Amino acid sequence: MTLIPKSHPRAKSLFIREKLVNGFEKGLVAREGLLAQGRGEAFDYLLGEKTNQAAKRAIKAAAAQLLQAQRPVISINGNVAALCPKEIIELSVHIKAKLEVNLFYTNEKRKQAIIKVLKKNGATEILGTNPKNSTRLQGIDSARRIVDKNGIFTADVVVVPLEDGDRTMALRKAGKKVITFDLNPLSRTSQTANITIVDNVTRAIELLSSEVKKLAGKNEKNLQKIISDFNNKKNLTENIIQIKKNLTRRAKIA
């Protein structure tokens, strides 16, 4: 039996899979979240299991957008809590963003498990936990329509890792800038968001924090230029082309 080196992308994918399974066993991740992870792994493989140049440009634009935000919010679901809670919290500190738990498959036990993990990793204020502060996001029927009136409801920029298309569309219609991580460049989420980082969130989240720190000293004009120069549709097309090239290359090897 051939052992895979720890530095190999496939070993990293297996480690991510193990974290999701552990998250499921701890009550953080819904069964459907495991299915979503499998779909993501397939696209990650097609993208070469590394952060490409298109993703790096999206990360830079996202960093600029977050630094310009007045009321940024990071939406947390079970997969994110299981995969990268510490990194998400570090990002929230850098951009002074609020954290809000928002679940598609929701129940109180699962929500409390996620809150516990976030607090264990340093979160102090977590929104989406007090029914008295709840309100509804128009244009969506799932449980994700229930948002905190002090968080996502009043946010100007929302980071939605591992998102569903319906809520992305609803957030856009509500006038919010949406930044997402999505390994599928053809998904409704990718196509609807303002800035789509086509990369594995476990790789890209730390890169985003690093980029925020790099751009922190830039003035508003420079940040706005970075945002204006970014074209999400063009960036997504580059990722689709990359997938086609990788498929062609692997077909020749086979």
Image (cartoon, helix red, strand yellow):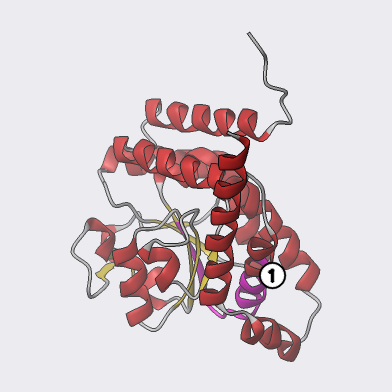
Q: Residue at x 53, y 68 (%)?
A: 236
Residue 134 image position (x, y, % from top left): 28, 65
The image quadrant that residue 225 belongs to is bottom right
Residue 172 image position (x, y, % from top left): 38, 78
Q: Residue at x 55, y 34 (%)?
A: 16
Q: Amino acid at mark 1?
A: Lys
Residue extent of the magenta highlight: 59-75
Determine whether 130 is above or below 7 in the image: below
Residue 188 in sight here: yes
The image quadrant that residue 231 belongs to is bottom right
Q: Residue at x 56, y 28 (%)?
A: 14
In the picture, measured across the screen, residue 211 lies left or right of residue 135, that is right
Q: Is residue 65 magenta?
A: yes
Judging by the rendered image, the residue that carries numbered circle 1 is 60
Considering every residue shown, the one lying at the far front of the view is 252
Residue 147 in sight here: no
In the picture, measured across the screen, residue 182 lies left or right of residue 104, that is right
Considering every residue shown, the one lying at the far top of the view is 1
In the picture, measured across the screen, residue 162 lies left or right of residue 62, that is left
Where does the C terminus fall, quadrant-wise? top right
User: In the image shown, does 160 or 251 lie closer to the viewer?
Assistant: 251
In the picture, measured across the screen, residue 216 lies left or right of residue 40, that is right
Q: Residue at x 63, y 48 (%)?
A: 87
Q: Secondary structure at mark 1?
A: helix
Determine whether 82 is above or below 206 in the image: above
Residue 2 image position (x, y, % from top left): 66, 13
Q: Is residue 98 magenta?
A: no
